[in-house]
Each structure stands twice: as structure tokens, then as C-alpha cells.
Image (cartoon, rainbow, N blue to C red):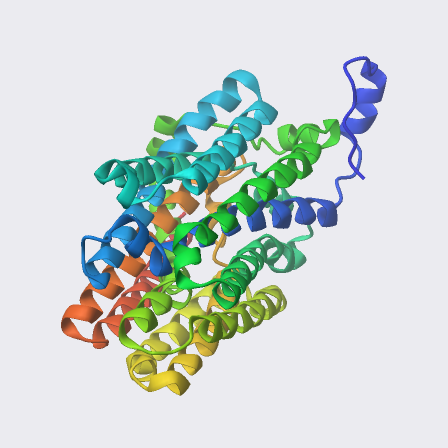
Amino acid sequence: MATVTGPTASSHDHGVRAHADVAPGEIAVGVVVGRASEYFDFFVYGIASALVFPSVFFPFMDRLHGTLYAFAIFALAFIARPLGTVLFMSIQTRWGQGAKLTIALFLLGTATAGMAFLPGYDKLGVFAIVLLAFFRILQGIAMGGSWDGLPSLLALNTPKERRGWYSMLGQLGAPVGFIVAASVFAFLYANLSEQDLLSWGWRYPFFVAFAINVVALFARLRLVVADEYQSKMGELELEPTPIGELFRVKGRHVVVGAFAALASYALFHIVTIFPLSWITLYSDQSIVGFLSVQILGGFIAAAGIVASGIIADRVGRARTLGGLAVCIAMFSGFAPTLMAGGATGQKAFILIGFALLGLSYGQAAGAVTANFGRRYRYTGAALTADLAWLIGAAFAPLVALGLCSQFGLAWLGAYLLSGAIGTLAALGINRAMNYKS
């Protein structure tokens, strides 16, 4: 296990630790813990924006437009996330990775707790909405700053023939975070009256998120500040590089990498957040029952992520990502029919969608980050992920609900198809660039 050495460690001891083996399994645990806590925060907000925030912060609007406004604020975090990455890269350069991660996760916890204490529109009026947007932006900045480089360390510190397997481990944080967040909301809906839920019950998941962040902070700090990990990060050149230099030298790879994961990221909120808003608006289904189906979907997604590691190690990560993009394109053809097919069709949409999400998302992160080389990988991988979330997932609930409510569910299929086309185009461009080089 990694240990943190005190300042009195001798130079000889430090030299020995610098060459100590860094266990991939231990890195993977740190990645899963960190990502699960972050995803829990974001899913708590996402679920609340579909189920609770329209009534709490936008009671002066009809349910549809209140939900659309809540989804617009939902997107603010993804817009702010690249800014957070740039800001906290500077903090890491000046004060170190431990300070960066501590500040970022405390900022994330503070923003989340701030939402928990935030009065609704009936108490503060429009100022409540302004504060909600402010805390959401802080969440995005903190998420950008929480990049610790452990996924890149994991990818570079494992055998090449096993990189698909180890790369998928970090992605397990997404279904874990969703399962826990959805379970908390299902419990609240099952045990509270609507009045209690809208008055105080919705705040409970945000308090839980703050507590989880504190635990995750110490779990991750234990890894990132340990001498052997810092030495290995330095050996592999996993450290910040100037943003201007990155885009000047590797800018095209940042853009291609962001679009390479588009199919998976477009599907991400289409099966998690959007359906909750749709069934609330246009169905009489039980929220608890629907959340239970989504929780089952979360377990299916986790199994899909594990399977993606096995598949990728056999056929290659890029081929896996491309093959799943084709599957998502096929799914887009009958997704509108399923969503319009009542409770049975909607359950099928959720379960099939989560299966495809797990298989594709398992290899969505870092499938083309080898293009950055060692020098630019740390910063390049962070900004690539930020842009992938921004163009693929940030506006998915807002766009899908807005288009489908106005023009019909056929636009749901069009949205998913556009993501699949984006992934296939990016992978083709990436292959052509590598062939020329």
C-alpha cells in the first residue's frame, strides 16, 4: 500500500521509494473512489433538476418551462469545467497537486452544501435562482480542478495488452455514483409526502454528497501525495503544461479526442436525466418505480463497463468505441418508438440504453489520448474530457426535452444519431492523422 512519508525521510529512502512499484490495482481503487464521489454530486443535482427544482425554484412557470430552466442551469457546470481545469493547473504548478486537490474538493463540497441550505423561490425570489446558478458554476470549476491524473497514470503503468481492462476501472465511478444518487431519491420519494420532499427532503442528498466528498478527499490525497506516486508521475511526465503550448502543438488532438467520445457522452444524460423529466411531464408512472428501473440499468451499465475492458483488450479500444457508436446509431432508430411505447417501452429504452452506455462509456475516456505523448498527456487528457462533457452531455437534457416536447420524440433519435456520427467521424480523422504521421 502507498504511504505518505514525512519531511524527515532521508534522500536514500526517497530514492528507494522513487523506484518502488506502483500497483495498478491501488491506483484503480483511488480512481473509482474519486470518480464515484464526483458523479454522485452531479447526479444528485441532475435528478433534482428533473424532479424537484422546477417546483422549488421555478414555481412561477409551468412544469415544462421550469424544467427547461433547471436544465439550463444544469449545463452551467460543464461550461465552467474547462475554466476550472485551467485555473487549477496554475494552482498545481505553484503549490503542488495535494493543495490543488484539497482546494478543488473543498470547493465542490462547499458548493454542494450551499445548495442544500439554499432557500427556494418562495423565500428569496429570483435571488434564489441566481445563487443556484452560482453554486452550479462553482461545482463545475471544482470538477475541473479535481483532475488528479490517476487515470493517465493507470493507463501508462499497466501492460499494453491490458490497458482496456484497467482503463475501464475508473469509468465504474459513473454507474456507482448514479446508483447511490438514484437510490437516495427513491428512498425519499417512497417515505416522504410531496410537501415534505419539496420543503426539506430534497436537501438530504446534498448533505450526503458533502460527507462523501470529505471521505473521498482523504482517500485520494493518500494516493496523490505519497512519494512513490509523485515520483512515478514525474517519471512519466504527468504534470501540467502551458495551455497555449498544448493547443499550439496538440490542439487538433484535443478536439478529435473530445468528439471521439461524443456518442457515449450524448447517451449519458439521455438515459439518466432526460427520461425522469419526460415521465414526470407526460406519464403517470411512479417516480419510485421508474427510479428502480434506472437503478437496475445502473448495474447493467457497470457490467457493460467491465465487459468493455475485456472486449477492448481483444479488438482495440478505438475499434470498440467505433463499434459501439454504430450500435448507438442503430438504437437511435427505435429509441423514439420505445419512449412513446408506454411503461413497457420506456423500461426497455432505459435498460437497453444503459447497456449501450456501459459498453461505450467504459472505453470513452482516453481512447485516443496516446496522441498527446507524455509531455502533454496530463493537461491534454483533462481538457479533452472537459470538452467531451461540454459538447456531448452538458445540453443533452435541455436540448432533448425542448425539441421532443415541441416537435416530437423523433428528435431524440436524431440527437443520439448525431453523437454516433460525431464519434465515427472523429475516429476516422484520428486514424488518418496517425497514418500520415
Where, quadrant-wise, is the N terminus in this rendering?
A: top right
Specify whether 200 is left or right of 315: left
Picture coordinates of residue 39, whole percent (x, y): 50, 51
Q: In the picture, residue 348 is in which quadrant?
A: bottom left
Specify whether 29 is left or right of 258: right
The residue that appears at 27% across and 41% down in the rendered structure is 129
The residue that appears at 23% across and 76% down in the rendered structure is 409
Position of 229 relative to 307 (above/below): above
Picture coordinates of residue 324, whole percent (x, y): 44, 70
The residue that appears at 64% across and 54% down in the rendered structure is 160
* Residue 379 visible in the current orientation: no
Closer-to-camera residue (332/200): 200
Picture coordinates of residue 401, whole percent (x, y): 25, 65
Closer-to-camera residue (2/99): 99
The residue that appears at 48% across and 31% down in the rendered structure is 107
Position of 283 relative to 264 (above/below): below
